[in-house]
Image (cartoon, grey):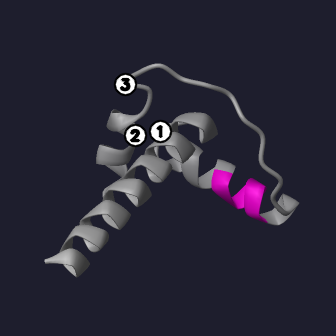
Amino acid sequence: MNMEKVIQSAHLGETKTFSIRVQVTILDAFKKACEENGSNASRTLEALMEEYVAETERKNQNDCD
């Protein structure tokens, strides 16, 4: 996944806050990865979700073709 694209695409529209529960070790590793990529957890998670939805839509479209 292209992290530069992910980071740049975050927060382009209206936003809403939600909470998720994850293991502490996963959260710590995610935060470290975000710092290394020059982003924050919120922006990166939003962009990753966006990319996941787009990939799923492409897969569904290909399955229908």
Q: Earlier in the sequence, mark 2 or mark 3?
A: 2
Q: Residue 59 occupies which quadrant of the picture?
A: bottom left
- Which residue shows up at 41% across the image and 47% down it? 50
Q: In which quarter of the image is the N terminus?
A: bottom left
Residue 12's label in the rendered image is 3
Q: Is residue 28 magenta?
A: yes
As measured in the structure, the alpha-carbon distance from the residue carrying label 3 to the one carrying label 1 is: 17 Å
Q: What element carries label 2?
A: helix
Given residues 58 and 47, the one toward you in this image is 58
Q: What residue type is labelled 3?
A: Leu
Q: Is residue 46 magenta?
A: no
Q: Residues within 10 Å of mark 2 (few under 14, many from 20)?
A: many
Q: Which of marks 2 and 3 is in front?
A: 3
Q: What residue type is labelled 2?
A: Ile
Is residue 4 shown left or right of residue 25?
left
Q: Nearer the viewer, mark 2 or mark 1?
A: 2
Residue 7's label in the rendered image is 2
Residue 49 sits above or below residue 24 on the image: above
Q: Earlier in the sequence, mark 3 or mark 1?
A: 3
Q: Mark 2 near mark 3, Cβ–Cβ under 8 Å? A: no
Q: Residues within 10 Å of mark 3 (few under 14, many from 20)?
A: few
Q: Earlier in the sequence, mark 2 or mark 1?
A: 2
Report which residue position mark 1 lands on: 38
